[in-house]
Image (cartoon, rainbow, N blue to C red):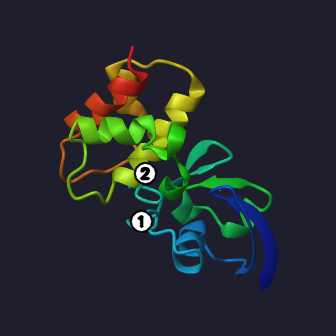
Amino acid sequence: MIKVIRMTVNGKLEELGIDERECLTDTLRNRLGLLSVKKGCEAGECGACTVLIDGKAKNSCVYLTVWAENKEIITVEGIRGKSGNLHPVQQAFVDEAAIQCGFCTPGLILTGVELVNSGKKYTREELRTLISGHLCRCTGYENILHALEKVVGK
């Protein structure tokens, strides 16, 4: 069954007719062209599909689009630093060489944005736990942890 929903995506109000079974990953990628939202495991295990929903990092592959009614969705395309520059988390990933193939990067960056927005500082072990829902095949996580420590480390 098709349901019309309204949600704000990267600051823009979207009104879409959605099959009630459609996951948010498919809506963002296929309907809105937001390709930073990756399809990985499609089971909520790898973190590649992570987006911010009302400020919280969520796996969009296991989140039905109809649940996003009246929610604010942010993807990597929607984050910016002051003056349109890279967000501090993005800059830290660049500075610390925390990017290799890039498949996991958008999800990890959005988790980092949630952490920055929390206003808290985290130990390395806490950060390791907080990113445990993200799988990265390339970096071995050390540079990712360095980048996150740069912006939210104790």
Residue matched to label 1: 38
* x 47%, y 41%: residue: 111
Residue found at x 43% / y 23%: 152
Circle number at residue 107 = 2
Q: Earlier in the sequence, mark 2 or mark 1?
A: 1
Q: Is residue 87 above or below residue 11?
A: above
Residue type at numbered disc 1: Lys
Q: Quadrant of the C terminus?
A: top left
Cα separation, mark 2 vs mark 1, equals 8 Å
What x and y, as percent, mark residue 2?
A: 77, 84
Left of 98 or right of it: where is 4? right
137 on left or right of 59: left
Residue at image point 72% right, 77% down: 20
Q: Quadrant of the N terminus?
A: bottom right
- Dot 2 surroundings within 10 Å: few (below 14), some, or many (20 or more)? many
Residue 44 in the figure: left or right of residue 17: left
Q: Splitting the image into 4 quarters, where does residue 24 fall?
A: bottom right
Measuring from the top left, give residue 106's x and y in whole percent.
41, 53
Asked if residue 34 can be seen in this view, the reply is yes
Nearer to the camera, 68 or 12: 12
Q: Secondary structure at mark 1?
A: loop
**Where is residue 130, by image quadrant?**
top left
Q: Are marks 2 and 1 in contact (CB under 8 Å)?
A: yes
State the residue in front, 21 or 39: 39
Mark 1, Cα crowd under 10 Å, few <14 / some 14-19 / many 20+, is many
